[in-house]
Amino acid sequence: MTRPATTATGVPVVGVPTAAPLPEDVQALLRRLRMPHIRAHGPDVVATAKAQRWDPVEVLRVLLGHEVAGRDRSALATRRAAAAFPTGKTFEAWNQAASSIPAPTQQALRTLEWVHRRENLVLCGPSGTGKTFLLEALGQHAVEQGLRVAWFSLEDLGALLRRHRADDTVTKAIARVLRADVVVVDDIGLLPVSTDAAEGLYRLVDAAYERRSIALSSNLHPAAFDELMPKTLATATVDRLLHHAHICQTSGDSVRLSQALAGQGVKPLP
């Protein structure tokens, strides 16, 4: 099926002949070179180039631009899927003024310089004060900037440890996790911490120390982690976690509860 010709920005070109398919040998070469986006946009670009008498270099520039843009979109989708974000929230929905974290601190976190310096981030405070939202928005922003993110709960870390302990591949499993530039561990302190989860957190923090960034949210300040896990493990974990860490404490009422009480949590029933 043929399509109307368009410019490089996707705008239909008036008066340009209907785009004919690329010759089979050209399509075969593009498949072999793994250039699906040039293959998809090629007919339109060639038709437009003929009608507008483009310079050959411009044709090449537009075709390569489509390929690069397509690959960037695919890579972003892959990084976003690999991160396994819980809800898909981004800074587009974030209300900076509603957060108790100072605005300059929020802006500094959004630069992601702390990630490039392999520093850690700890968000601690009451439930509903925006910790998970901010972590996910930062994670989404990092993915958009070409960084890799991995999202875990403590229960996930415990399950990871149990799964790989049987064949003694825990170290390799943690190393695979640390292929990400930022590893997020969300909602520490809400549920009792199993021995496996506590050990998993320690192993992750220890392996990431000065090599990768850990971003963590907790209802408790890390100094109180010995209330959740064995004191020896808590001390060793916190020692490594906080050495190069930014600690941001949130405060105030639960945003979710406030919205619910104001009738903003659901659409009114008819």
Image: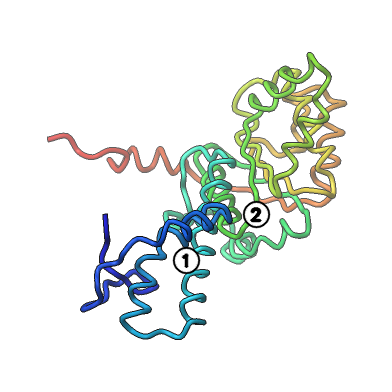
Q: Which residue carries the number 2 mark?
A: 147
**Secondary structure category for the residue under label 1:** helix
Horizontal side of residue 139 vs 178, given as left or right: left
User: Residue 66: which disc?
Assistant: 1
Residue extending furthest left? 270
Residue 77 seen in the figure = yes
Quadrant where the N terminus is found in the figure: bottom left
Q: Would you identify the image quadrant in which residue 221 lies?
A: top right
Residue extending furthest top? 166
Above or below, 77 against 189 in this view is: below
Q: Position of residue 213 (x, y in %)?
A: 74, 49
- Picture colour scheme: rainbow
Distance CA(mark 1)–CA(mark 2): 22 Å
Quadrant where the C terminus is found in the figure: top left
Which residue is pictured at 39% across the width and 73% down the height?
8
- Between 113 and 48, the residue placed more toward the observer is 48
Instruction: Say what amino acid the circle numbered 1 marks.
Output: His
Please tell me how many numbered marks the rendered image carries. 2
Horizontal side of residue 48 vs 209, given as left or right: left
How crowded pointer 2 is (Cα within 10 Å; few <14, some 14-19, many 20+) is rated as some
Which residue is pictured at 28% across the width and 38% down the height?
266
